[in-house]
Image: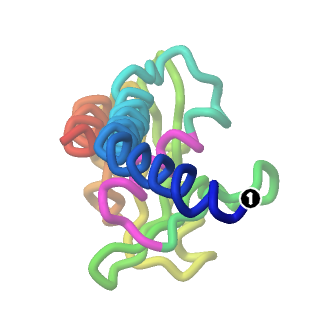
Amino acid sequence: MRLFYYLIAAPALFLLRVLFWPFKTIFRCAGRIHGWRKERRRFRRADYDDMDGWEFEEYVGGLLARDGYIHVEVTRGSGDQGVDVLAQRDGVSYAIQCKHYRAKISNKAVQEAYAGAEFYGCDVPVVLTNSYFTPSAEELADEIGVELWDRDELNRLVRRVRR
């Protein structure tokens, strides 16, 4: 039995391994590339207008993490003090209030983001929306130092992540 293994089976198995190794390597690489492309497609195809509020917050957290923000945390639904996502970048901490509305965003969101940033001890309060802001919200944000990221800024963020 050992003679059969050493003279026939082992060389045949070795030959098969040598012949099929390139195919195995090609299929593994193709699988990795497919997985990478599938992950990128998931972010490309996501239509944030069709999401509900919680899905939108999770989506924004994922975008920020892929854009180079660290310590990205989506806060719990109730008792979050007006902040939906906490993130850091270049040593600056951000408190992000996500607003998923069709109408323009008013002063209330700006006030919530400011108060939430103070509560969490963040450097920069941000209101991010899939819509736009009222002129009074823009004026208040300018006065108290809240960054406003409207639909155009959100689209820029999505495009940066796509690359």
Q: Toward the viewer: 140 or 30?
A: 30
Colouring convention used in this rendered image of the protein: rainbow
Residue 62, image x, y percentages:
48, 48
Q: Magenta region, mostly helix, strand or loop?
A: helix
Is 126 situated left or right of 109 in this image? Answer: left
Residue 111 to residue 88: above or below: above
Q: Residue at x 50, y 50 (%)?
A: 13
Q: Quadrant of the N terminus?
A: bottom right
| Label 1 secondary element | loop
Pointer 1 local density, CA inside 10 Å: few below 14, some 14–19, many at least 20:
few
Range covered by the magenta-colored residues: 57-70
Residue 102 to residue 135: above or below: above
Q: Residue at x 60, y 76 (%)?
A: 120
Is 27 situated left or right of 107 in this image? Answer: left
Residue 46, image x, y percentages:
44, 23
Is 79 situated left or right of 100 in this image? Answer: right
Query: Which residue has dot 1 on it?
Result: 1
Q: Toward the viewer: 152 or 62?
A: 62
Q: Residue at x 33, y 42 (%)?
A: 19
47 drawn magenta? no
Q: Toward the viewer: 71 or 40?
A: 40
Q: Residue furthest right?
A: 78
**Res 161 quadrant in image:** top left
Residue 88, image x, y percentages:
41, 73
Q: Residue at x 58, y 22 (%)?
A: 51
> Is residue 137 visible in this depiction of the protein?
no
